[in-house]
């Protein structure tokens, strides 16, 4: 619709886009993509629901080394034996292995004992859909090895290209030093990121450079630039060659085999294949002497990609590549004349540096909406890119690729080892520079408001309108600019109007087996109770809690209550303290330890966030007459375990007890509250300790008398939470109104006004 409006406004009666053709293309595209979409199985097998370990057999479709010494293997033609004979499992399986001692080849058979679960997304609307990401690839299940029985691998395919690639990767790994610089070179040359540790990934992610370590169109561009460099050298050695074959065409012919080899060597991943397709169309247009090569080549490549794989349009890598290239093609011509110079030496070097920054700015402007929506962050480290990218593309990758090829022969392997070592030392130098800048606070990353989809369209429309008007030197069409402005601003106005209502809500986010609750108050005030869990390789604060909070709203919290320091409640805390504007942090006097504690110790002193300890009998005023009363622990409580000392909070407004939030308190703490005669009544009860039997006290439910019971438990969690007996007691107390994140996803409880009735809004998910 925006395309038609823009065409009509900018071209008037000369509009070249027929409305009927657009409608027919949309209908055909929707039908075509629907036919190509793999259908998810409606039900899971009984043995899977019981979390039974089974014998799994399948054929390797692809093996993907992951950071932190992990391996992801996609299995096809899967057969499962749960003790009653072998049966086929529809679709493919993503099988995850930690610290693998073997990397299989495509086509290789494997037999293993594993636990299998369906692919599942967190049930929070507006977030990245993990289930859809795998479904469009035909992967319906996830699996992990069970017990200590090692997988049994079949024979390797003979004389396969995959075998050659695997052997070359092993040779490169053998000749690289065991440093993170060596791991970086291995990732850039072969796509194997398994040797990159989490500190390196965190450092590059924190500086907005993580994309440079995952093979993509950027790296294909570097390889194509090598072809341009070879063409330049050929012109110096044999100037007459350029009279027969112009340098751009010569560069295409020299770069083509390099790009093909690199795409083959790097797994090949889908992003490399798509980037190679784009390069192919650009090369064809250059060889034909066509103009508008960048934009026309992008169009033809996109048409081919969509026809072959229509669901790839949902792929973030393709979206980012398209936006970045289109941004460069659309905006860079306005800056190019500023850097044109015939002078040599320092002036030319400065002009080249300024042009590099301009290209980066153009690409960054175009992808801002995508980066903001998917990641909720913005990293303005353009000057770091000025050092990092040229060293990466002009030194490390050429040395690494040449060294990799030289390792093939025993005669040239020593020279290859020298080149690989030199590339690794340069990479170590870049990582050292990054560490210094990071320690000095010079690589900032900001959490930003995640735009709603009309805002993204409005931004794109204003950007295109400005570019067209500047290029054609015409007046800005008021209708088109007005439409873009309305799309950009109207959603936020609606959000502000919604926040101004006299409404209190409690949102239980789906964070798996953990907990994170959002208290929303009139005026846009928000408080968080617990921050979700995670692991050394996955932070739910960054992946789920933060993006949920910033969807259409700024990264701001009036305060955070940490019920206790267990990792399933606290792992997201360092990220939120570092990236959000947080008013205060309230705890039970205990802070996280281990990895989470180390991150928090580094971030908390420089954040300016005040830390306060709460005790029973105290209360915290929120706003609009709403407060949080503390019921546990008191000063005389003798329990020392973190769970038993969980903060038990009650959300109150004008004398009305809205919700009881007991953290992971167990029977000892619950009994202590009841013995003190505390009033624990509330309309909403969040089950203590995710519905564990260890937190069950029948008197407690009788005292709360809830209308609704919530449970944050996680789909098919390993502990079997909530306990069936606890669910039965809670259901009896609440008249059957029990909502869990595993079954209902995110659940929102709403009270309109001081006397408004309780309304529950679950997100319905497939069982």
Image (spheres, rainbow, N blue to C red):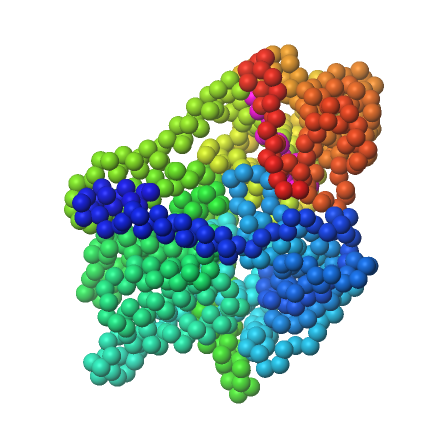
Q: In the displayed structure, does residue 653 sit left or right of residue 297?
A: right
Q: Residue furthest bottom?
A: 411
- Kindly indicate the quadrant of the structure image that contains residue 623: top right
Examine the structure image and report whether residue 516 is included in the region drawn in magenta.
Answer: yes
Q: Quadrant of the N terminus?
A: top left
Q: Residue at x 53, y 30 (%)?
A: 557
User: Over which residues does the magenta segment extend?
Assistant: 504-518
Q: Residue at x 38, y 55 (%)?
A: 322
Residue 537 in view (yes/no) = no
- Of the pair 258 and 414, the residue shown nearer to us: 258
| Up/down of 2 relative to 119, above or below | above
Return the x and y of residue 499 as percentages of the image width and height. 47, 24
Return the x and y of residue 471 as percentages of the image width and height. 20, 50
| Up/down of 665 relative to 228, above or below | above
- Of the pair 405 and 144, the residue shown nearer to us: 144
Examine the structure image and report whether residue 274 is included in the region drawn in magenta.
Answer: no
- Kindly indicate the quadrant of the structure image that contains residue 85: bottom right
């Amino acid at each position: 619709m925006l395309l038609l409006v823009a065409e009509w406004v900018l071209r008037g009666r000369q509009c070249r886009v027929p409305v009927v053709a657009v409608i027919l293309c949309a209908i055909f595209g929707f039908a075509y993509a629907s036919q190509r979409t793999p259908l998810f199985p409606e039900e899971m097998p009984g043995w899977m629901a019981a979390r039974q370990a089974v014998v799994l057999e399948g054929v390797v479709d692809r093996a993907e080394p992951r950071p932190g010494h992990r391996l992801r293997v996609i299995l096809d033609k899967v057969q499962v034996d749960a003790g009653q004979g072998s049966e086929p499992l529809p679709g493919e399986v993503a099988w995850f292995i930690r610290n693998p001692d073997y990397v299989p080849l495509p086509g290789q058979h494997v037999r293993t004992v594993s636990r299998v679960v369906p692919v599942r997304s967190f049930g929070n609307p507006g977030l990245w859909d993990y289930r859809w990401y795998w479904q469009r690839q035909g992967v319906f299940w996830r699996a992990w090895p069970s017990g200590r029985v090692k997988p049994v691998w079949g024979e390797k395919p003979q004389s396969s290209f995959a075998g050659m690639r695997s052997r070359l990767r092993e040779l490169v790994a053998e000749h690289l030093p065991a440093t993170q610089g060596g791991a970086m070179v291995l990732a850039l040359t072969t796509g194997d990121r398994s040797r990159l540790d989490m500190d390196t990934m965190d450092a590059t992610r924190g500086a907005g450079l993580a994309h440079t370590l995952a093979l993509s169109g950027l790296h294909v561009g570097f390889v194509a630039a090598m072809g341009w460099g070879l063409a330049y050298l050929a012109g110096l050695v044999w100037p007459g060659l350029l009279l027969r074959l112009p340098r751009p065409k010569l560069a295409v012919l020299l770069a083509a085999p390099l790009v093909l080899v690199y795409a083959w060597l790097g797994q090949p991943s889908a992003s490399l294949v798509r980037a190679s397709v784009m390069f192919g169309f650009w090369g064809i247009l250059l060889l034909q002497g066509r103009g508008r090569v960048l934009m026309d080549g992008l169009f033809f490549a996109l048409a081919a990609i969509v026809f072959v794989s229509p669901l790839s349009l949902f792929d973030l890598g393709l979206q980012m590549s398209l936006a970045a290239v289109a941004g460069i093609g659309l905006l860079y011509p306005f800056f190019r004349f500023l850097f044109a110079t015939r002078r040599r030496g320092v002036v030319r070097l400065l002009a080249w540096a300024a042009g590099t920054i301009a290209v980066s700015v153009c690409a960054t402007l175009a992808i801002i909406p995508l980066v903001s929506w998917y990641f909720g962050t913005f990293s303005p480290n353009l000057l770091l890119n000025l050092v990092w990218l040229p060293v990466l593309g002009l030194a490390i990758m050429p040395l690494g690729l040449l060294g990799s090829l030289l390792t093939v022969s025993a005669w040239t392997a020593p020279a290859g080892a020298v080149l690989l070592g030199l590339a690794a030392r340069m990479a170590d130098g870049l990582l050292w520079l990054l560490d210094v800048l990071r320690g000095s606070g010079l690589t900032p990353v900001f959490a930003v408001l995640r735009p709603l989809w009309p805002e993204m369209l409005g931004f794109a429309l204003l950007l295109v309108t400005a570019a067209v008007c500047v290029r054609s030197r015409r007046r800005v069409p008021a209708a088109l600019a007005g439409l873009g402005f309305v799309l950009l601003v109207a959603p936020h106005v609606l959000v502000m109007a919604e926040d101004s209502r006299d409404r209190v809500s409690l949102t239980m986010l789906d964070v798996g087996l953990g907990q994170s609750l959002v208290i929303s108050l009139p005026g846009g005030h928000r408080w968080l109770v617990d921050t979700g869990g995670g692991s050394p390789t996955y932070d739910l604060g960054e992946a789920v809690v933060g993006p949920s909070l910033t969807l259409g709203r700024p990264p701001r919290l009036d305060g955070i209550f940490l019920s206790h320091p267990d990792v399933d409640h606290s792992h997201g805390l360092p990220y939120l303290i570092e990236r959000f504007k947080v008013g205060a942090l309230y705890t039970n006097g205990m802070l996280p330890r281990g990895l989470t504690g180390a991150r928090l110790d580094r971030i908390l002193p420089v954040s300016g966030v005040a830390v306060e300890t709460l005790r029973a009998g105290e209360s915290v005023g929120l706003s609009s007459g709403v407060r949080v009363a503390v019921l546990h622990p008191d000063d005389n409580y003798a329990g020392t375990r973190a769970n038993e000392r969980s903060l038990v909070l009650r959300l109150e407004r004008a004398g009305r007890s809205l919700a009881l939030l007991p953290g992971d308190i167990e029977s000892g703490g619950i009994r202590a509250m009841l013995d003190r005669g505390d009033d624990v009544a509330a309309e909403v009860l969040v089950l203590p300790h995710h519905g564990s039997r260890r937190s069950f006290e029948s008197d407690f439910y009788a005292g709360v008398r809830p209308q609704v019971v919530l449970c944050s438990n996680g789909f098919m969690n390993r502990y079997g939470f909530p306990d069936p007996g606890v669910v039965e007691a809670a259901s009896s107390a609440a008249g059957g109104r029990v909502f869990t994140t595993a079954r209902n996803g995110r659940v929102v409880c709403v009270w309109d006004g001081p006397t408004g009735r309780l309304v529950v809004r679950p997100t319905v998910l497939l069982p």
